[in-house]
Image: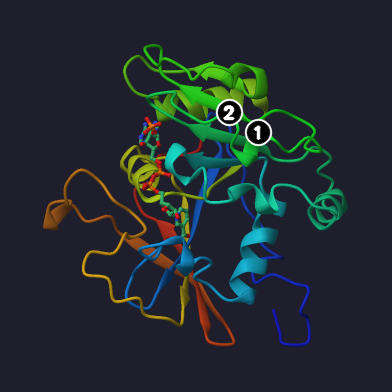
Amino acid sequence: MSEQDPAGGVYDDLELPSGTWRPYTAIQMVMTVDGAIKGPTDDYWPISLEADQRTFRRFRIHFDAVLHGARTLGMRIDRYMWSEELQRERRRRGLREPPLFIVVSNTGQIDPKDRVFQRRSYPMAPLVAVPEVAEVTEGLSAVAEIVRIGNERVDLEGLMRYLAAERGVRRLVCEGGAILNYHMLAAGLVDEFFITVTPSIIGEPRPRTAVEGPAALPSDRLQQLELVTTATHGDEVFLRYRVRGARPLA
Ligand SMILES: NC(=O)c1ccc[n+]([C@@H]2O[C@H](COP(=O)([O-])OP(=O)(O)OC[C@H]3O[C@@H](n4cnc5c(N)ncnc54)[C@H](OP(=O)(O)O)[C@@H]3O)[C@@H](O)[C@H]2O)c1
């Protein structure tokens, strides 16, 4: 993307493989220079600049499905859910359907009034994946399609198999948050990690970071990434990494 192309996103020309038994999967996140993915209060949102927001919005052009953890609801994740721009760009690429919007929750305790479920113009109901034991909030099944996968917790590998086999999802973007990112990576279900470094410092003592598991990985088992591209736009840096150790696609 150049300064002369204000309508474009950094990754508009991306060519991605497609998955068969599971979707080809990318995580997309943004962080400050001191590693925070959010500030202590909503006043700090959005943390990124226009180029990242535009790139984030347009990234969905490439995917059949968009995945979120239940705790990103309420963060206005619906705001780029559907737009004329996205629709036009997808049509240009031969993709007629909008991306399937998916939320995963172990408890099923999700507010059916969340804006994600109120987008009447969106052509299909979001899918909420829960385990067998989950007690789903009253009213949720009226606004979302509920899919049960896994016993005590959502079985993420099972969910990926279902999406590929039953819903034709060949490419999926996981837009966070940190906890879901960890579990997707730990299960070997992530092929690429896109992260933007935005030029601000929040300075919180214990910031939320892009990947958070129950405990740090042992030092000899750190997740290894391979740098694919870097791009700069203004003061923001866009990093694209391949995840070593992702499960084979076929
Ligand atoms: N800077 C960025 O790029 C960016 C992007 C996205 C989000 N964020 C920030 O990240 C924060 C939210 O992230 P978060 O880490 O707190 O939560 P999260 O990853 O959005 O959601 C975690 C939840 O996902 C559900 N889940 C279901 N199955 C799971 C499984 N197998 N493994 C793991 N989780 C599963 C659980 O929901 P239940 O609790 O319902 O059981 C779990 O509590 C927000 O503050 C948001 O602003 C920042």
Across and down, in percent, residue 7 comes to 78, 73
Q: Residue at x 21, y 69 (%)?
A: 205
Mark seen at residue 125: none
Q: Quadrant of residue 121?
A: top right
Quadrant of the rendered image holding ligand 1: top left
User: Disc 2, ligand 1: is the CB inside 8 Å?
Assistant: no
- Whether residue 240 can be seen here: no
Q: Report if residue 119 is visible in the image.
A: yes
- Which residue lies at the image location 31% right of the left edge and 42% below the top edge? 186
Image colouring: rainbow
Q: Say what secondary structure mark 1 lies in.
A: helix
Location of residue 158 in the rendering, given as x and y in whole percent from the top left corner: 45, 23
Q: Residues within 10 Å of mark 2 (few under 14, many from 20)?
A: some
**Vertical position of residue 134 compared to residue 200: above or below:** above
Q: How far separated are the C-alphas under marks 2 and 1? A: 6 Å
The relative height of residue 139 versus residue 8 in the rendered view (above or below) is above
Residue 181 drawn at (x, y percent): 39, 47
**Residue 117: mark:** 1
Under circle 2, the secondary element is: loop
Q: Which of 169 and 214 is in front in this view?
A: 214
Residue bearing the label numbered 2: 112
Quarter occupied by the N terminus:
bottom right
The answer to whether marks 2 and 1 mark residues whose Cβ atoms lie closer than 8 Å is: yes
Near-viewer residue (32 or 143) = 143
Query: In the rendered view, does 129 fall on the left or right side of 53?
Result: left
Q: Which amino acid does label 2 sit on?
A: Pro
Q: Which amino acid does label 1 sit on?
A: Phe
Q: Residues within 10 Å of mark 1 (few under 14, many from 20)?
A: some
Q: Residue 115 appears in which quarter of the rendering?
A: top right
Q: Which of the marked residues, 2 or 1, is nearer the chain's N terminus?
A: 2
